[in-house]
Amino acid sequence: MNEERIAKQDAEGQESGDEEGKAYDKETWENLVFRFEEPNAMARWDSPLFTVLHEDSTPPFQAIWDALIGSPTSKVVVRPNQATVARTQSGQDYLYELDKVTQGVLNQILQWSKDHPGEGGGEVSIEGKEELIVELPANVVGLPQLQRMRRQFIGLNRQNAVPVERIRIGFVGFLNDNFESS
């Protein structure tokens, strides 16, 4: 096609005014051909893959639309993800609440540790709107380790704000996951 366009431009003696019929110069065309990567339906970024030939007068518009948007009649459902869901607006006091709630959970764990000196393991009941349980590991957990986990949790949630009422639940889950893996 590019050769035909070059021949047409040479015959007319000037460049075509419309972008549709404009030819690439030889060097640009060679670079484009060299960089061409054949689509692979198994690759995540090429899926779903719709092959549309140049001569095809009726591409599968509806199938492409359904793949992008989804359709109530098809079983394809476009799921929301971090890129498509609007982030919840965090209030101006979000960092304060994040700090206060996580420190409150640590205080309850430290109070339990004070009441049960030298004991490893155990369940600490975290009071709030709903009662949550932190399952401590068999080895004694000290303040530095708890503070490190707290800083880690705050760092993770500073950018990706969660609703304030979910901070306590998230932090208790985070602690339990870390204690279970250690």
Image: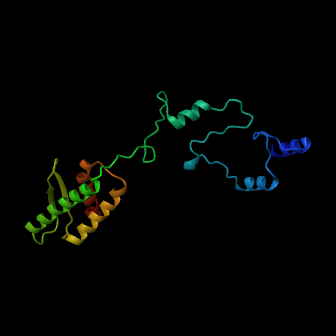
Residue 34, percent from left and from top: 73, 56
Q: Which residue occupies the foreground of this view, 119 or 130? A: 130
Residue at image point 10% right, 68% down: 114
Instruction: Please state if 22 lies on the left or on the right of 165 as rendered.
Output: right
| Residue 182, visible in the rendered structure | no
- Number of residue marks: 0
Q: Which residue occupies the foreground of this view, 72 or 15? A: 15
Residue at image point 67% right, 52% down: 37
Classify 140 as above or below 88. below
Residue 51, percent from left and from top: 66, 39
Instruction: Please state if 82 lies on the left or on the right of 32 as rendered.
Output: left
Classify 50 as above or below 36. above
Residue at image point 77% right, 54% down: 28
Q: Which residue occupies the foreground of this view, 87 or 59? A: 87
Residue 39, percent from left and from top: 64, 48
| Residue 150, visible in the rendered structure | yes
- Quadrant in the picture for the N terminus: top right
Residue at image point 29% right, 65% down: 151
Residue 149, percent from left and from top: 28, 65
Instruction: Please state if 104 lies on the left or on the right of 81 as rendered.
Output: left
